[in-house]
Amino acid sequence: MSNSVVAMLNNHLLKYFDARLVRRSRLYANGAALFPPGTWVMFELPGGLKLWIDLGDVGVSLECMAGRYEIAETRFILDNLKEGDTFLDIGANIGWFAVQAAAKTGAKGRIIAIEPRTQTGAYLARSLQANGFMDRSEVHHCAAGAQAGRVSIVWNGEAGNPGGTWSLPDKQMLQEFREDCFRTEEVPVQTVDAVVGDRRVDMIKIDIEGAEGLALRGAMKTLSQSRPVILSEMNFPLLPKISGLTAGDYVRWMAQQRYQCHSLTAEGGTGPVLAAGNLPGHMTFINVIFKPMAV
């Protein structure tokens, strides 16, 4: 598609997308987007919230537009946040959760969003601003880690899924991805504790492709003082490579912090306890709930 056509679409047609039109349209075929990555437009969610999305992003943006993105996870977050709560979104991506959480927690709430990719984070901030939520929100353009520093992040620019972005603390892994022509960006690393400071956090959503163990090691103060509920991705192949923890190790480490791991039900509720030795390792990843136990 020519640059002039893309420019025309952005300038004239795509300030706001009607949800009904999106559901009737065919914006991707055979798993591939019909627009190149980086085709950013503003989409209006049912209910009137606005979200900047990338028409070249099959993994997140187009699923949001179709109303299919992480339905159980969305329901869990919105059902458990209250007015005035503080929501920490680690790996906020385009802001699907951050924007809706800002609406749910209201003017007295607080949204702390961490997103390392520069372009994605910039559009996340634009979405919060478009909804008038910047007075209750903050966007940190960094990765979350066990200690401050810098790290390279990598993604497949042609895959149409910016959510598939990995932090690569290992130089050999980084070189292998570069040789495969993946895109890379060096970004600052901050600990969650440094970002949060002394503020209370009521809920954490964390989805950072296997770096969850590193990020939560940098959140010890926040976990011990605030005791937030945590909705976490558990990526079975990436946790050992990025965080140096198997999924079972992750559950055991969280138990040491007095958190119990539960499954997430299809309806967005808290399911049975998941033991470290009885995880569904045949799957690539699942999302789980860590609930604080009595200290």
Image: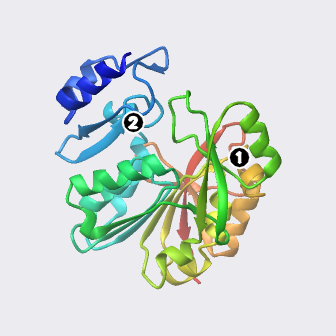
Query: Is residue 95 visible in this depiction of the protein?
Result: no
Q: Determine whether 261 is above or below 181 in the image.
A: below
How would you rate the neighbour count of disc 2 (Cα within 10 Å): few for under 14, some for 14-19, many for 20 or more?
A: many
| Amino acid on which the number 2 mark rests in the picture | Ser
Left or right: 18, with 223 as reference point = left
For the C terminus, the image quarter is bottom right
Q: Determine whether 91 is above or below 33 in the image.
A: below
Q: Which of these two is toward me, 68 or 57?
A: 57
Q: Tell me the residue at 25%/38% (across/down).
A: 43
Left or right: 102, with 35 as reference point = left
Q: Tell me the residue at 43%/75% (across/down).
A: 201
Marks 2 and 1, the one that precedes in the sequence: 2
Query: Where's residue 291, x and y in %?
Result: 53, 67
Q: Residue furthest right?
A: 172
Cα gap from disc 2 to disc 1, whole angstroms = 23 Å
Left or right: 53, with 104 as reference point = right
- The residue tagged with tag 2: helix, strand or loop? helix
Please name the residue that numbered disc 1 is placed on: 238
For the N terminus, the image quarter is top left
| Amino acid on which the number 1 mark rests in the picture | Leu
Query: Where's residue 109, x and y in %?
Result: 29, 71
Q: Which of these two is toward me, 15 or 221?
A: 15
Q: How is the image coloured?
A: rainbow
- The residue tagged with tag 1: helix, strand or loop? helix
How would you rate the neighbour count of disc 1 (Cα within 10 Å): few for under 14, some for 14-19, many for 20 or more?
A: many
Query: Where's residue 114, x and y in %?
Result: 48, 61
Q: Determine whether 203 is above or below 239 in the image.
A: below
Q: Which of these two is toward me, 51 or 212?
A: 51
Query: Where's residue 165, x and y in %?
Result: 59, 44
Please name the residue that numbered disc 2 is placed on: 61
Query: Is residue 5 visible in this depiction of the protein?
Result: yes
In the rendered image, which quarter is residue 214 located in?
A: bottom right
